[in-house]
Amino acid sequence: MRTEKSLRNVKYSIIGQVVTLFASFIQRTIFIKFLSQDLLGINSLFTNILSILSLAELGVGTSITYYLYKPIYEKDETKITQIMNFFKKIYIIIGWVIFCLGMLIIPFLSLFIDNIKDYDNIYLIYILFVLNTSISYFFSYDRTLIIANQDKYIDALYRYVGYVLLYITQAIVIIVSKNYILFLILQIIFTIVENYLISRKARKDYPYINNKKLQLEKNEKKEIFKNAKAMMLHKIGWVVVSSTDNLLISKFINITLVGIYSNYNMIISALTTVITQIYNAITASIGNLCASKEDNNKQENIFLKIDFFTYFIYAISTSCLIALFNPFIKLWIGEKYLLSISTVIIISISFYINGMRKSVLAFRDSMGLFYVDRYKSLIEAFLNIVLSIVFAMKFGIDGIFMGTILSSLLSSSWIEPLVLYKYGFRMKVKNYYKRFIVRFIYLFVIIIINYYLVTAISINSEIFEFCIKVICSLIVTTTLMIIYSIKNESFKYFVNLFKQKIEGIFYGKKKV
């Protein structure tokens, strides 16, 4: 049952994200063509500032989701309603806190943008970003119950239909009016409508949560806030690592380079989001597994499968990114938007390092192990800022991303699996570290082989050349990964699972 729900959630999430990615790509292309490069940089900068403001959420969402798994498993509607009523109050407060904090930052925007007076309506643009972020909290709590109940596909349907319609409408507005303000207003309208609709769906499917009188006891609220405080520390680390790069590029280099990097970051973010949908789709099932108190060996066995899948996907993606990033950007928007190959390699490796944490985090969050390694994120945040600034002065943009990679390797990449194995599985973590090192070495070999083979391809037609490079890169990387994985038990499991699904498609109906 868990596997079936996970596969259904994964299917809807990936299809939705791929369609959304295509729509966002068209929207970004039109944005670049009809609006200025500096405006693209401002768009990315303000997005990062609002990501930092989202720290006001304090990790409450993840903490409360964890507390939903047990009552959902036990079908305790009273407890679910109590948790959701508490969630609603907290998220409304958070929405207002983010709005107020956002307004307080307005006088300091000039610290990040040189010659801020040269940009028209810059403060209005920022206020619209603040409104869009704060408003999203006023209804988003209800979708948590849908996701925790292993029905992520419903959330995916609402979310991605909304995104596609938004991107199409924004693209039309840019072409017709070239009005960036209207572009942002549309974003706010769609945020309100999509959140309202998913909230209405949740309250229709789970009508018992409409009982506003049921409230949590004080000791239960304290327990949630205890984990929420720990999650706040985790979130600080995540936000600093993921959201300060553009701020540092803007401060130490220039706003134009922020815009150029944003095109690369859009692709990495889109790819990350597609892959993340898989983990979002299965996290509720993992939570259900942990709530059912299965033995540690079974839990670790499932973790090994998911961790192998994580490596397989991220290794192929990283190798292909390094080989294809610049050819794609050149074909898409031209040579003036290219970053150096050294920068491409560094941001791709950063993508891989962060990606390999996903399987660990999926289990950590599902097991509620937020409190044990709460200070790890503060260490990571401190290291990231210090190392990125120091390296930026010496190596420019490459140094900023080098600092991000090192801060992760020196903290999260080894502490998180240690906590999972010691307090979750209650086993030794040594074998995980060995796998991590061996896998990275093998990935390095794949990257070298793939890059030089793809770079050697030269055809007169740029479009045809790029298509051949994509096919070659996928075949080479996937083949090398299969050779590495052929004897792996987790690989055999996924092969058999794939065979069963194919047989179900061709023979399932005949059995009825």
Image (tube, rainbow, N blue to C red):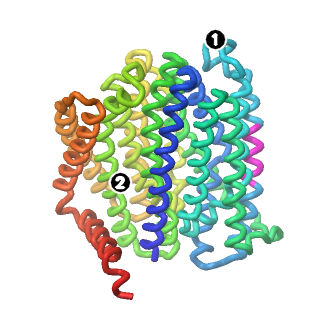
Q: Secondary structure at mark 2?
A: helix
Residue 287 on the magenta span: no
**On the picture, is 436 further left or further right than 389?**
left
Q: Which residue is denoted by mark 2 in the rendering? A: 310
Residues 447 and 267: in front is: 267
Residues 65 and 419: in front is: 65
**On the picture, is 194 further left or further right than 286?**
right
Amino acid of disc 1 = Asn
Cα distance in 3D space between marks 1 and 2: 44 Å
Looking at the image, which residue sits at the far front? Answer: 176
Q: Which residues are magenta?
A: 90-99
- Tell me what residue is drawn at x 38 percent, y 18 percent: 395
- Tell me what residue is drawn at x 77 percent, y 43 percent: 96
**On the picture, is 49 further left or further right than 33?**
right
Q: Which residue is denoted by mark 1 in the rendering? A: 115
500 above or below 358? below
Expressed as whole percent of the image width and height from the top left, the position of residue 67 reads 61, 65
- Label ID, residue 277: none
Tag 2 or tag 1, which sits nearer the N-term? 1
Q: Can residue 387 be spotted in the picture?
A: no
**On the picture, is 158 further left or further right than 325?**
right
Expressed as whole percent of the image width and height from the top left, the position of residue 468 reads 23, 40
Expressed as whole percent of the image width and height from the top left, the position of residue 343 reads 35, 26
Q: Can residue 485 be spotted in the picture?
A: yes
Amino acid of disc 2 = Thr
